Amino acid sequence: MSKFYFATSIQHFAEILYHKQLTPITLADASSGILFTEDRKYWIEKIEAQNDKDNIEDYAYAVNIELEIDTSFFTSLMANANTGRFSDKVAAYHKRVNKNISVKKLDVTDTNVLCLLDVYESDETSDNISQLWLLKVSNTESKLWIDFTNNIIKMSCPGGLDGATELATKIAATL
């Protein structure tokens, strides 16, 4: 089992609290999914790098979420030609080190895929390497999203902006 992290808005965290399960976010291309990493520092830096806002609800990244998931689930998805994808950047890494890649590159039209977007150094992981992942789904009823959420062993909130979790809890009570 491994821990993975992502950061999200107060509104999205309120939805998670209300539904008592992870819900996807709308991605830049209007699909749904989630970006996550093996290290929490990546998201803390994202939270801290945001421009100051007048209202705490306006921050894209306000709450840090920790997921505990069996890593064999990711291994099986990446080994499957229908669901495993590499970004151009990761494919280029493999090419540079003369590794034969059998994983398809992510296409902008792909949905219901798990994509390894980046690999980078991190002092928070045991091997000092972290990965940025994208789980991209068509909707919450997709088999991939259901399987992903069913493989979450534990979900917690290790922190966020001051007052963010409290406000999300209040919002969740009104949904």
Image: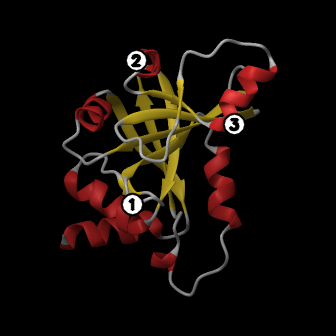
**Frontmost residue, 141 versus 96:** 96
Q: Are marks 1 and 2 in contact (CB under 8 Å)?
A: no
At 42% from the left and 46% from the top, the residue drawn is: 109
Which residue corresponds to mark 3?
Answer: 89
At 50% from the left and 41% from the top, the residue drawn is: 107
Q: Earlier in the sequence, mark 3 or mark 2?
A: 2
Q: Earlier in the sequence, mark 3 or mark 1?
A: 1
The answer for how far apart the CA atoms under marks 3 and 1 are is: 22 Å
Q: Name which quarter of the figure residue 72 lies in.
A: top left
At 77% from the left and 13% from the top, the residue drawn is: 98
At 62% from the left and 61% from the top, the residue drawn is: 47
Question: Does residue 119 appear to the left or right of 85 in the view shown?
Answer: right
Task: Tell me the kind of residue under disc 2.
Answer: Asn
Question: Does residue 64 appear to the left or right of 20 in the view shown?
Answer: right
Task: Tell me the kind of residue under disc 1.
Answer: Ala
Q: Is residue 12 visible?
A: yes
Which residue corresponds to mark 1?
Answer: 30
Task: Tell me the kind of residue under disc 3.
Answer: Lys
Q: How is the image coloured?
A: secondary structure
Q: Are marks 3 and 1 in contact (CB under 8 Å)?
A: no
> Residue 152 location in percent, x, y?
34, 31
Which residue corresponds to mark 2?
Answer: 80
Residue lying farthest right? Answer: 96
